[in-house]
Amino acid sequence: MIRVEHFQTPSAFDQLAEEWDALLHRSAMDTIFLTPAYQRTWWRHLGQGDLLLLTVREGEELVGVAPLFLTEEEGRRVLQTVGCVEVSDYLDWILAPGKEEEVLAALLDFLNGSLSWDAIDLCNVHRDSPTLALLPALARGRGWSVRTEVQEVCPVVDLPETWEAYLASLGRKDRHELRRKMRRAEAMEELRWYIVGPEHDLEAEMETFLRLMAASTPEKAAFLTPPMRAFFKELAQAAFGAGWLQLAFLEVEGERLASYLNFVYDNRVLVYNSGLDWQTYPSLGAGIVLTGFLIRHAIEEGREAYDFLRGSEPYKYRFGGKDVTVHRILIERER
């Protein structure tokens, strides 16, 4: 017997956390952005509308989670996945392996009969997601209109076993430029790079990161509203506690010039955001150098991939990124 339950208060993130995490790790789309820790943090600082966490159980076993919220847009009631859209690069509904179609059907039946809504707008669904493969046909079978589209690309570097093999995979010009900048940086006695660990003050390091992020571009400075800053700080604390945080800095003579806020999850490095001082040592290429150090470090640790996440910025391809698409699924029904 499959049944759907719904939760409307944020305490459900904690209430379901253990089962939720266990199901996520078994599912096809295991990502940090779908962990209860991430979802809870996003909702606390950036959430809006009405929370609607749906769970699917077969007997007592949790076999599905659809973390949703309901908002009104231009007179329409729209359901979206918690985390949509700007700062959550991969999102989905969490489905038990081998039961995906059954769970999706149960969720749609519940949504059809229990709620007033006009559209389901799912963002950043990975191209390999069972949801993307199965949900459109299930929705059309209920008489609803469905549209899917490529929403964004995520350049990903599949990492080889050695640094030299990685360099060999790059184009000649990109390989030469990366080697030149890294060798020059390594020859500077006053230069060092580090990853924040237990010996550091994470709160102070995050303040420095946010300062560098705001200094990178006017757009990033405007993006860092007080709620966004609070989100980044709490997310960093949660990720650090879980062992997922990779907050890295490059400095010269004690002056931090570049920083990356990455996650290490499921043996992949996820490049979440960055900060850069463009004016001090402009010829150094601090951002390029730190990225090179971090990719080499990832290879040495045996990581599977270096994922630049959403966005087609040219530098990602100079490091060997190959596009993975994320998709939007828009389901609409008559009032």
Image: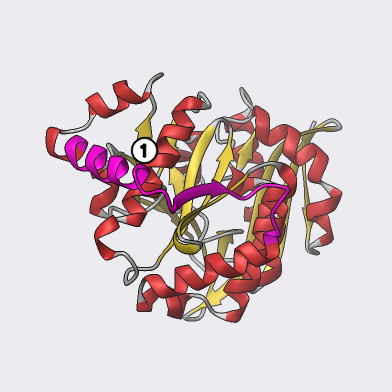
Res 165 quadrant in image: top left
* Residue 20 to residue 206: above or below: above
Frontmost residue, 146 versus 213: 213
What's the residue at 73%, 48% (across, down)? 198
Q: Residues within 10 Å of mark 1 (few under 14, many from 20)?
A: many
What residue does disc 1 label? 156
Looking at the rendering, the stretch of residues picked out in magenta corresponds to 175-202
Asked if residue 150 shows in the view, the reply is no
Quarter of the figure with residue 29: top right
Q: Is 109 on the left-hand or right-hand side of 280? A: right
**Image coordinates for residue 128, horizontal then vertical, percent:** 43, 33
Q: Is residue 182 magenta?
A: yes
* Rendered location of residue 114, percent (x, y): 71, 58
Tell me if residue 3 is in the magenta stretch: no
Q: Residue at x 27, y 36 (%)?
A: 320
Q: Label 1 is placed on what type of residue? A: Val
